[in-house]
Amino acid sequence: AEVYAAADAGAGERLFRACSACHKLEDGANGVGPHLHNIVGRVKAEVDGFAYSEALGGMEGDWSAENLSAFLLNPTDYVPGTKMSYRGMADVEDRANLIAYLESVGG
């Protein structure tokens, strides 16, 4: 919570460039991954028209900042069976910055 409170959305924008290979920020614009518009606080696996893995599709809850951070740390540990082939983001400040950016552009 402390790290997220001090997060820098500008630094997160730079980090998002790697995410943009698979994800878009525009509402409804899915790519290889689901769009990330309004991801912070959104119910997990709720993007219309995106075919989630069975593992992620069966998860309950929402994408709180804490849940997003845990997923970004190591997606396959957080959701065994996920289709997301991202190795993870080890630095907690980087994760907080990225989440702050996603929240700032989410509308």
Image: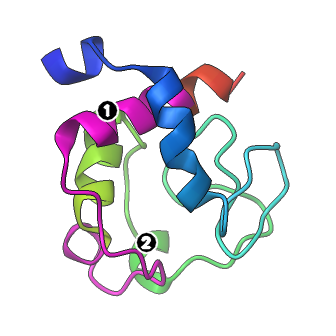
- Residue at which label 2 appears: 56
49 sits to left or right of 37:
right
- Tell me if residue 23 comes above or below residue 41 in the rendering: below
User: Is 82 or 19 nearer to us in this picture?
Assistant: 19
What colour scheme has been applied to the protein in the rendered image?
rainbow
Residue 37 in magenta stretch: no
Q: What's the magenta region? A: 76-101
Residue 18 seen in this snapshot: yes
Badge number at residue 96 = 1
User: Is 50 or 73 nearer to us in this picture?
Assistant: 73
- Tell me if residue 45 comes above or below residue 1 in the rendering: below
Q: Where is residue 99 in the image (x, y as percent from the top left)?
A: 43, 35
Task: Point out the frontmost of discs 2 and 1.
Answer: 1
User: Is 22 or 59 nearer to us in this picture?
Assistant: 22
Q: Position of residue 19 (x, y in %)?
A: 56, 59
- Tell me if residue 2 comes above or below residue 66 in the rendering: above
Q: Which amino acid does label 2 sit on?
A: Leu
